[in-house]
Image: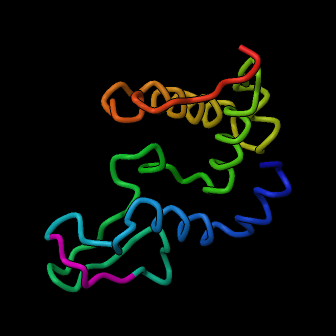
C-alpha cells in the first residue's frame, strides 16, 4: 500500500476508527464492562462508546497501542506503514519530520509499535507461513 492508497482509504480519523472497530469487533461492538451489545458511538468523541446496559463509557482502543494517545489515528497508520515498509527501520527523528509531531511523541509511537510487533503472547500468529523478501 502506498502513501496515497493509505490516504484514500483513510481520508479522516473517523474512517480509521470505523475500520479499527470492524476489525476488533467483527461480530459487533460489545461493552467492555457488562458485555451488552446495546452500545452506540459518541458523536462529540468518536473514540468513545456508550453502553445503554450499564450506562458506562468505554473505548474500543483499551489495551492497545492507541489507548492513551491523543495523536491522530491517521498519523498512527502512516507511522505503522513507514515502520513496516522501511528496510532498515525508521528513526524517531525521521518519523517526527514525516508526520509532524514532537520527537517525544514519535519515539513513543515507535516504541509502542516495536513492543506490539514483538508481542510473544499471541503464539497463534507464529504458526502461520510468512514470506519475507530481501532478508
Q: Quadrant of the C terminus?
A: top right
> Is 131 rendered above or below residue 69?
above
Closer to the camera in the image, 76 or 29: 29
Q: Which span is picked out in magenta?
A: 35-40
Question: What secondary structure is the magenta-colored segment mainly?
Answer: loop
* Residue, far right: 4
Closer to the camera in the image, 80 or 1: 1
The part of the image, by quadrant, that contains residue 11 is bottom right
* Residue, far top: 135
Image position, residue 130 (x, y; %) = 56, 29
Q: Is residue 22 left or right of residue 120?
A: right
Q: Residue at x 67, y 56 (%)?
A: 74
Closer to the camera in the image, 91 or 135: 135
Image position, residue 128 (x, y; %) = 45, 33
The part of the image, by quadrant, that contains residue 126 is top left
> Is 4 rendered above or below residue 133?
below
Image position, residue 131 (x, y; %) = 63, 28
* Residue, far front: 129
Tell me, yes or no, whether the highlighted magenta stretch contains residue 66: no
> Is 5 rendered above or below residue 111?
below
Q: Residue at x 66, y 24 (%)?
A: 132
Q: Residue at x 60, y 52 (%)?
A: 71
Q: Is residue 104 left or right of residue 4?
A: left
Amino acid at each position: 500500500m502506498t502513501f496515497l492508497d493509505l490516504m484514500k482509504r483513510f481520508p479522516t480519523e473517523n474512517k480509521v476508527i470505523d475500520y479499527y472497530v470492524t476489525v476488533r469487533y467483527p461480530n459487533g461492538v460489545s461493552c467492555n464492562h457488562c458485555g451488552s451489545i446495546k452500545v452506540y458511538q459518541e458523536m462529540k468523541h468518536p473514540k468513545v462508546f456508550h453502553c445503554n446496559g450499564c450506562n458506562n463509557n468505554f473505548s474500543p482502543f483499551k489495551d492497545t497501542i492507541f489507548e492513551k494517545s491523543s495523536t491522530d489515528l491517521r498519523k498512527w497508520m502512516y507511522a505503522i506503514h513507514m515502520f513496516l515498509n522501511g528496510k532498515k527501520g525508521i528513526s524517531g527523528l525521521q518519523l517526527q519530520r514525516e508526520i509532524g509531531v514532537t520527537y517525544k511523541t514519535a519515539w513513543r509511537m515507535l516504541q509502542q509499535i516495536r513492543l506490539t510487533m514483538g508481542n510473544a503472547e499471541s503464539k497463534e500468529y507464529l504458526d502461520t507461513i510468512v514470506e519475507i523478501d530481501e532478508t
